[in-house]
Amino acid sequence: MFSKLKLITGNANRPLAEEVARFAGIPLGDIDLFKFSNDESFVKINDNVRGADVFVIQPTCYPVNDSLMDLLIIIDALKRASAQRINCVIPYYGYARSDKKDQPRVPITAKLVADLITTAGADRVITVDLHADQIQGFFTIPVDHLFSTPIFTRYFKSNLENEDIVVVSPDSGGAARARTLAKRLNCSLAIGDKRRSGNNDQTELLNIIGDVAGKTAILFDDIIDTGGSLIKVAKALETQGASKIYAACVHGVLSGSACKNIENSPIEKLFITNTIPLTGDKKLSTKIVQLSIAEMLAIAIKKIHIEESISILFR
Ligand code: R5P
């Protein structure tokens, strides 16, 4: 059993960390995190963490390399300050899409990041909707892999009650994820038959497999980055007669002109979670609706602290 539970956050997603702290009823620990004028990062933990069970909330989102480096130095500082257990809560795992050697002479950065986090001194990782399940196996420490599907399910069940819904996976790779949501919503499933011809938005959609005509389509994906993949599928859904098109993505990376592209697309609403904060102009988007994972994380943290099962979160 661990005695003291401590919550700490880096700078990557302070609003989420504050919400988790409120749900958990635990204040956020006092840390100073800043950069020297030479761009090197520095952290100082002002609370005593000796013998504590510390949970560090830090998604490795934009600015990805700073967020990752900050996480690593926080872990190092905690280890040197004699924390008993260091749990990294990484709701969005950056570099997750670099998960296999699918071209000659390319890195598997998701594995390298797992090694860095482990070597720094983490004892456990808690994460949400990994891009690829195998990333869990890149770690030699326990990884609690949580899913946001119950959160999306609850929202759609109470807000789209009387609609004829079809959940659409933008590609065959995401079919299992979309099938889980379709099963929970008790509705049909369609799949975009996408052929990727390059990186980022250089993709080509050929067909939609499944019946979407006259239905409310919910495009379901783990990540929306430039929006390129989803918008192409949304256009195909429009052509095939879907009556309304929504998109639901766990991680709103929303890089470049993603928000503008979504505004000008047939997607009526984009539902994302708050694994990544909405910053700057993105907050102004009238199409984006953010659902919170804070309560789920707070429950996970409290259960892990008292070494209770977290299976209830998957139901
Ligand atoms: C790809 O395998 C992912 O699941 C997402 O579909 C993709 O990363 C989204 O990127 P973008 O929004 O730039 O098309």
Image: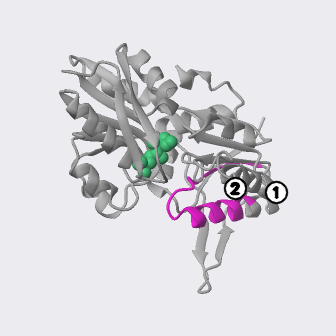
Q: Residue 267 is drawn in which quadrant?
A: top left
Residue at coordinates 55% horizontally, 51% vertically from top-left? Answer: 27
Disc 2 and disc 1 in contact, CB within 8 angstroms: no
- Residue 39's place in the image compared with 174, above or below, is below
Three-letter amino acid code at the position of disc 1:
Ser
- Secondary structure under tag 1 reads loop
Q: Which residue is mark 2?
A: 107
- Residue 285's place in the image compared with 169, above or below, is below
Residue 22 place in picture, x, y as percent: 47, 45
Lateral position of residue 27 relative to residue 292, left or right: right
Residue at coordinates 56% horizontally, 46% vertically from top-left? Answer: 26
Q: Residue 279 is drawn in which quadrant?
A: bottom left
Lateral position of residue 97 relative to residue 241, left or right: right
Residue 73 place in picture, x, y as percent: 70, 65
- The residue mark sitting in front, 2 or 1, is 2
Q: Which residue is mark 1?
A: 82
What residue span does the magenta drawing correspond to? 52-75
Lateral position of residue 232 relative to residue 14, left or right: left
